[in-house]
Image (cartoon, helix red, strand yellow):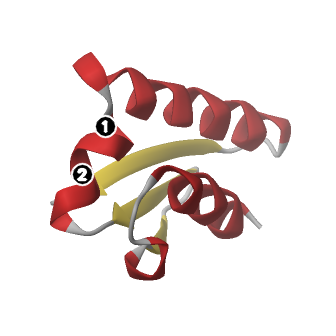
């Protein structure tokens, strides 16, 4: 469910939505979501001063907290 959530948000932001890839790496209490996008779309996902990335992380953390987990978003270059 969370992978689809991150994928949906990322695809809405980028010019090449077919190149959005999200992988879930599960630990004991923390889930890491690795987001990969086209090199040209990196700036759109990160945003000015990291604002867009911070907003995505906030949404992700809020949804994960409801499930009693901790979520981390890593944007892979």
Count of numbered labels shown in the rendering? 2
SS at mark 2 in the image: helix
21 relative to 68, above or below: below
Residue 4, numbered label:
none
Q: Residues within 10 Å of mark 1 (few under 14, many from 20)?
A: some
Image point (29%, 52%), residue name: 75
54 relative to 10, above or below: above
Q: Which residue is mark 1?
A: 46
Quadrant for residue 43, please give it. top left
Q: Nearer the viewer, residue 54 or 40?
A: 40
Q: Quadrant of the N terminus?
A: bottom right
Q: Quadrant of the C terminus?
A: bottom left
Picture coordinates of residue 22, whole percent (x, y): 47, 71
**Cα–Cα gap, marks 1 and 2:** 6 Å
- Residue contact between numbered discs 1 and 2, judged by CB atoms under 8 Å: yes
Picture coordinates of residue 36, whole percent (x, y): 32, 67
Q: Nearer the viewer, residue 2 or 70?
A: 2
Residue most toward the front?
Answer: 15
Image point (69%, 60%), residue name: 2
| 3 lies left or right of 56 | right
Image point (46%, 82%), residue name: 18
Q: Residues within 10 Å of mark 2 (few under 14, many from 20)?
A: some
Picture coordinates of residue 5, whole percent (x, y): 70, 58
Q: Which residue is mark 2?
A: 42
Picture coordinates of residue 44, whole percent (x, y): 33, 43
40 relative to 70, above or below: below
SS at mark 1 in the image: helix
Residue most toward the bottom?
Answer: 18
51 relative to 37, above or below: above
Quadrant for residue 35, please give it. bottom left
Q: Nearer the viewer, residue 17 or 70?
A: 17
Image point (49%, 50%), residue name: 13
């Amino acid at each position: 469910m969370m992978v689809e959530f991150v994928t949906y948000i990322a695809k809405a932001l980028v010019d090449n939505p077919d190149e959005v890839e999200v992988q879930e790496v599960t630990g004991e209490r923390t889930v890491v979501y690795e987001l990969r996008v086209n090199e040209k779309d990196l700036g759109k996902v990160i945003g000015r001063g990291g604002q867009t990335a911070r907003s995505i992380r906030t949404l992700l953390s809020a949804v994960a907290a409801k499930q009693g987990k901790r979520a981390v978003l890593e944007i892979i270059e």
